[in-house]
Amino acid sequence: MQPIQGPDGRIYRPMPVTRITKPKEDLRIGRISKPWSVYGRTLGIVILAFLLVQFLTVGVMGVIDGEPYLTVCGIIFSIPFLALIAHIQRPKIVDVRVAIPDPRGGHYHAIGPNETLWTPEPTRFRRHIVRDASSLDIPRSRSLWAIFAALITTSLTISIGLWTGIATDILFFVAIIIGIPFFILGFSIPVMAWWAISKERLGILTRQRDAESWLFLGMMAGFPAIVINSFVFPLIASTLGFDTSNEEAILNLTAVISAPIGEEICKGLAVALFMHQMDGGKRGFQIGFTVGLGFALIENLQYILLSFEAGFTGFALTVLIRGIGSIPGHAFWTGLTGYAIGSLAGERREAGEDEDEKTDDPGQTWLLFDQNTGQEINPREVMPNQSTTLASTFHQTLEARVQQIAIPKIEEIAGGIRPPSSIGIALMCAILGHGLWNGTAVFVPTIVLLLGGSEGHTILASLCATLLLVAGVLLLGDALMRGVNDENKESKGTTIPVLN
């Protein structure tokens, strides 16, 4: 800006605007802890992603059926949802302004054409534009499971009341009022609870933007999975001579064959897209676990919505079984694949093959403050590329891992199970686990009926088989968590701090 002459005849020069500079490596940034904001943003994204997947599927249906107008409609109606998701997921930029007391500084600092900072004492002023690299901050698992328990208990109470005829009119009115909130909580809270468990059990410091990207790609993996299950597999079955007019048989074959193979491959490919972010099996397992949760989240939305056809009883049972069985199942199965991919990434990074993929992202140290007390949470928390202790831990971890990568089998470690480091074997384990879950639901009722059992026997057998599967998933999942955590046991005492 040029000097100007004032009404008093004097020449005035504008204050120089503070230039935006690159922050120093020891820059510390504080933010208020708002764990439920992640939950709210996740809800918005999953609803948009669900609608996006539906319209994309309509577009594919138009291509297959030779109806161009369906394809055009599917594409056109997909664009607004895609734009909204991109807006929500856009990179967050933080404008950091630092005023440091200095006798040689000034009291006034021009920030922009219409903004000036005044300080009561002389200061040096610095301004930086940084990308938000703050840590994942989500509610604690025990709080989420408490909500989950209250959800199930309330739903069963309403069901019992409606069965017995106690205060039927009042309970029916209450059921209508809480229907939509319970639907939202039913499909999302158990997923968030397992997300919180993985964060707490694995203890890996994670950028929030990364974790949300993993979850979103898991949601979008549902689109190719739907295409495979709904269009590709029936076409293959027809080619092989199966009677596609028998809808029940095709649905059973889809559940037992197509869903395990197609869904695990789609989720595995989504995990592979983040291979550049992996430094070993543990990080790979974390990413796979989160991708699996994203897939379960969008799948759960549909299942919970359909469960209301059987009233609050069907809703409660569906939420319960999926919350402690299907959801962790998806996460642990994809976690197996993620561990193997992460092991390969760690091996390559150790060999120096990923040097060209490293970025110049100068990390910042973020400080988290409790919004109620104003007290700092975990004051020594740092980003991974800022700590020599973490660098040392990373180096030790890689050294300990190199000798395990070539072992293509599951190892038993101190009560835990180390996932296989071979991608092929890990993917096969994931497919078999998924197939066993779906196959049990399909074949147990059929076998009971073939043996002459009644409908009541069928329901009882299915319930017992489901309970056994849930127990198996939980026990296996716990063993996998302990096995994956054991990967870093040599660096015990220098664990990465986690935001709780």
Image: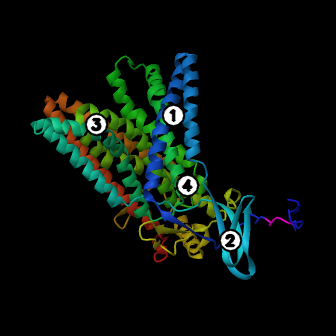
- Identity of the residue drawn at 41% across and 44% down: 297
The answer for how far apart the CA atoms under marks 3 and 1 are is: 29 Å
Where, by quadrant of the figure, is residue 396 drawn?
bottom right
Counting from the top left corner in percent of width and height, residue 354 is at 66, 58
Amino acid tagged 1 = Leu
Q: Position of residue 229 (x, y in %)?
A: 44, 30
Q: Amino acid at mark 4?
A: Arg
Which residue is under mark 4? 209
Q: Amino acid at mark 2?
A: Trp
Foreground: disc 3 or disc 1? 1
As shown in the figure, which amino acid type bears the numbered disc 3? Ala
Dots 1 and 4: beta carbons under 8 Å?
A: no
Kind of element beneath mark 4: helix
Q: Which residue in the protein does label 1 denote?
A: 52
Residue 294, position in %: x, y? Answer: 45, 46
Sequence-first disc among 1 and 2: 1
Q: Which residue is mark 2?
A: 118
**Residue located 29% across and 51% down the image:** 148
Q: Please state if 154 lies on the left or on the right of 144 as rendered.
A: left
Residues at marks 2 and 3, CA–CA distance in whole angstroms: 69 Å
Q: In front: mark 2 or mark 3?
A: 2
Q: Which residues are magenta?
A: 12-16
